[in-house]
């Protein structure tokens, strides 16, 4: 009996072993069949990420056009950029573990909340949609923003993003946008925009220092994002107003006048290139950021972060200029030149009404350039195409210096305002980067 039992056991094992071997082969075959699917998914996701990287500049461009059409104070316009790009960044941070939120680094910013399942969200699309959705809330009558949103959805749909993922991503982004709009509602910039329109009637840039002081009392000063106080970055005092012959102030006046009388073609080109009639200064620097990110093939997460930090730094730079407005009651060159030695002289550019100190072109440009230098690199050659013109720079700091000089060449500001603004803006940009949380 034992002999027969052994024979039966051996026969059963002979049948089982081939079956097990067959199952192993089938398992390997199934594994081999899954490999192309995994590769296809990776290629698919990579294609979607590349689409997001290519769409980011156009999304920012649509927002920039909307801010330009709004025609508000530059300090107000900079905050539309800041909150919209912050919404995009925070959406990315909420649904991408490698990206750190700015919560804790920005004054008063709430923790963005969304209960949409992270796995159901494609964060690059959600982030871009959040930028546009924030802009749409700021500018509800702007048709171009809604048109871009629809086009963005279709572009991702055509690239293979599933309809359910699109809808979940939009829902997730909407949660973050709602949080950022609540954050923006506690800032005085929108109330200030309303007051400016009601008090100037036509041109919102024609604001004098006395009006600004009254508006601060009515609406409250703009809330800074990174700054505890504007004082550490305050501009050095300008040359005191003194029209006596040979005074330091009249030396500055004479420089503006002489440049206006014998201006070179290059100086005229610089003045016109940085003129804000073609687009906002904030929009110009964000355009530089976009072009740099595309040129250097910076990944979506970092590119969006760069845009957000530049926008926030610019907003704080304008906050600084707003705080300085009215502290120094120095008139613009045209007034002094017309009253002292040439009644017919006119500047090449049209300056804003009111006081001349500080130079927002200098403070803002230096702050933006310093942020980009520290986030992207020093001596990064850039081709700046703006308003149908193009100029080449060897670094962001060179671009900032030229933007500052454009106000002297345009005949609207004195050199000491430019120098003080550049120094202040550099310090501010350096400070902003030091406050940033480190991404994972």
Image (spheres, rainbow, N blue to C red):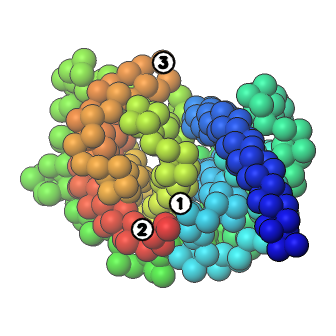
- Residue 308 lies left or right of residue 263; in this view the side is right
Q: Secondary structure at mark 3?
A: loop
Task: From this view, report whether residue 199 is shown above or below residue 327.
Answer: above
Residue at 57% in and 80% down:
104
Judge the density around disc 1: few (<14), some (14-19), many (≥20) Cα neighbours within 10 Å: many
Going from N to C along the chain, the mark reached first, 3 or 1, is 1
Number of the label disc, if any, that sits on residue 388: 3
Disc 3 vs disc 1: Cβ atoms closer than 8 Å?
Answer: no
The Cα atoms of the two marked residues, 1 and 2, are separated by 9 Å
Q: Secondary structure at mark 2?
A: helix
Residue at 57% in and 74% down:
106
Q: Residue furthest left?
A: 246
The x, y position of residue 346, in whole percent, is: 37, 30
Judge the density around disc 2: few (<14), some (14-19), many (≥20) Cα neighbours within 10 Å: many
Going from N to C along the chain, the mark reached first, 1 or 2, is 1
Q: Secondary structure at mark 1?
A: helix
The Cα atoms of the two marked residues, 3 and 2, are separated by 31 Å
The x, y position of residue 285, in whole percent, is: 46, 42
Residue 200 visible in image: no
The x, y position of residue 383, in whole percent, is: 35, 28
Along the line of sight, the residue nearer the viewer: 363 or 265: 363
Location of mark 2 (residue): 432
The Cα atoms of the two marked residues, 3 and 1, are separated by 26 Å
Disc 1 vs disc 2: Cβ atoms closer than 8 Å?
Answer: yes
Location of mark 1 (residue): 312
Task: From this view, report whether residue 406 is shown above or below residue 79.
Answer: above
Going from N to C along the chain, the mark reached first, 3 or 2, is 3
- Residue 123 lies left or right of residue 313; in this view the side is right
The x, y position of residue 405, in whole percent, is: 27, 40
């Amino acid at each position: 009996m034992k002999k027969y039992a052994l024979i039966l056991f051996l026969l059963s094992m002979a049948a089982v072993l081939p079956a097990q071997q067959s199952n192993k082969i089938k398992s390997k075959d199934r594994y081999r069949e899954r490999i192309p699917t995994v590769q296809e998914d990776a290629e698919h996701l990579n294609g979607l990420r590349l689409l997001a990287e290519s769409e980011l500049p156009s999304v920012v461009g649509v927002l920039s056009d909307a801010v330009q059409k709004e025609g508000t104070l530059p300090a107000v316009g900079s905050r539309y950029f800041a909150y919209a790009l912050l919404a995009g960044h925070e959406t990315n941070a909420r649904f991408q573990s490698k990206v750190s939120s700015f919560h804790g680094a920005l004054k008063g910013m709430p923790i963005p909340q969304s209960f949409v399942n992270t796995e159901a969200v494609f964060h690059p699309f959600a982030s871009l949609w959040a930028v546009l959705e924030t802009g749409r809330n700021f500018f509800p009558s702007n048709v171009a923003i809604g048109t871009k949103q629809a086009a963005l959805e279709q572009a991702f749909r055509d690239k293979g993003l599933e309809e359910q993922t699109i809808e979940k991503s939009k829902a997730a982004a909407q949660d973050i946008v709602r949080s950022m709009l609540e954050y923006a509602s506690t800032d005085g910039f929108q109330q200030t925009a309303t007051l400016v329109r009601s008090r100037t009637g036509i041109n919102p840039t024609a604001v004098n220092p006395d009006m600004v002081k009254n508006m601060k009392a009515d609406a409250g000063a703009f809330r800074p994002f990174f700054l505890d106080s504007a004082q550490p970055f305050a501009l050095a005092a300008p040359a005191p107003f003194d029209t006596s012959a040979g005074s330091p102030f009249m030396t500055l006046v004479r420089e503006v006048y002489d440049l206006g009388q014998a201006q070179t073609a290059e100086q005229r080109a610089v003045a016109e290139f940085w003129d804000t009639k073609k687009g906002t200064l904030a929009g110009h620097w964000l355009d530089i950021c976009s072009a740099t990110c595309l040129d250097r093939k910076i990944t979506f997460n970092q590119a969006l972060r760069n845009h957000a930090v530049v926008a926030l730094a610019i907003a704080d730079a304008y906050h600084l200029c707003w705080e300085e407005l009215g502290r120094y009651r120095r008139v613009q060159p045209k007034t002094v030149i017309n009253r002292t030695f040439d009644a017919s002289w006119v500047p090449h550019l049209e300056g804003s009404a009111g006081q001349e100190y500080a130079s927002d072109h200098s403070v803002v440009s230096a702050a933006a350039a310093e942020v980009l230098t520290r986030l992207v690199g020093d001596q990064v050659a850039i081709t700046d195409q703006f308003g149908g013109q193009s100029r080449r720079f060897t670094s962001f700091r060179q671009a900032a210096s030229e933007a500052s000089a454009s106000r002297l060449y345009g005949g609207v500001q004195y050199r000491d305002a430019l120098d003080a603004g550049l120094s202040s803006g550099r310090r501010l940009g350096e400070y902003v980067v030091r406050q940033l949380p480190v991404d994972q």
